[in-house]
């Protein structure tokens, strides 16, 4: 899923909107893409404190790099990888315990209902457009 967002108060508002919802890290910490690395290099940022996460997010955005984080839906193993570009484009890939309608087709409505409302309420981040594509 690709979301194009209009950001009024800095790209950190994207992370704020997501983490104020029921999306979260695992107990062992945040799985992120380190500064200076491409999106294939996932590493554990230990601890669930927002301080380190926010610092890494700012470092990536200031360097013009894509920020990556793995998030899980509260109370289960459903999750995905989220990439945030400095331009405000957000890419979500449902990679962990993907919710499906059958064994192959992703339940798109499940993900849309948990992501789109975060960016359609009045606030610092507004949804400009979204798209979903899936390959067999």
Image (spheres, rainbow, N blue to C red):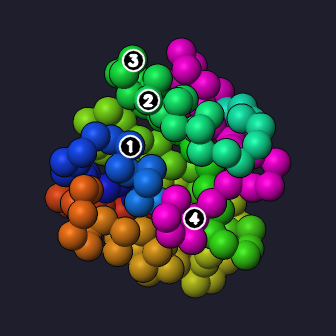
Circle 1 crowding by C-alpha within 10 Å: few under 14, some 14–19, many from 20: some
Q: Which residues are magenta?
A: 19-41
Separation of residues labelled 3 and 4 (CA atoms) = 26 Å
Circle 3 crowding by C-alpha within 10 Å: few under 14, some 14–19, many from 20: few
Of the residues under marks 4 and 1, which one precedes in the sequence? 1
> Foreground mark, 4 or 2?
2
Separation of residues labelled 3 and 1 (CA atoms) = 14 Å
The reply to whether discs 1 and 2 touch (Cβ–Cβ < 8 Å) is yes
Circle 2 crowding by C-alpha within 10 Å: few under 14, some 14–19, many from 20: some
Left or right: 82 as drawn, with respect to 115: right
Residue 91 percent across, percent down from the top left: 41, 49
Q: Residue at x 33, y 41 (%)?
A: 11
Q: Which residue is mark 1?
A: 12
Q: Main secondary structure of the magenta part?
A: loop
Of the residues under marks 1 and 2, which one precedes in the sequence? 1
Of the residues under marks 4 and 2, which one precedes in the sequence? 4
Q: Which residue is mark 2?
A: 58
Of the residues under marks 3 and 4, which one precedes in the sequence? 4
């Amino acid at each position: 899923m690709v979301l194009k967002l209009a950001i009024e108060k800095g790209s950190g508002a994207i992370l704020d909107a997501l983490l104020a919802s029921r999306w979260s890290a695992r107990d062992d910490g945040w799985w992120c893409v380190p500064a200076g690395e491409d999106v294939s290099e996932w590493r554990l940022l230990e601890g669930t404190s927002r301080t380190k996460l926010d610092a890494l997010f700012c470092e990536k955005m200031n360097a013009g790099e894509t920020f990556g984080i793995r998030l899980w839906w509260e109370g289960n193993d459903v999750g995905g990888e989220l990439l945030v570009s400095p331009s405000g484009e957000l890419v979500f890939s449902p990679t962990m315990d993907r919710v499906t309608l059958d064994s192959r087709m992703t339940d798109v409505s499940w993900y849309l209902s948990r992501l789109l409302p975060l960016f359609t309420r009045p606030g610092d981040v507004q949804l400009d457009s979204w798209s979903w594509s899936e390959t067999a």
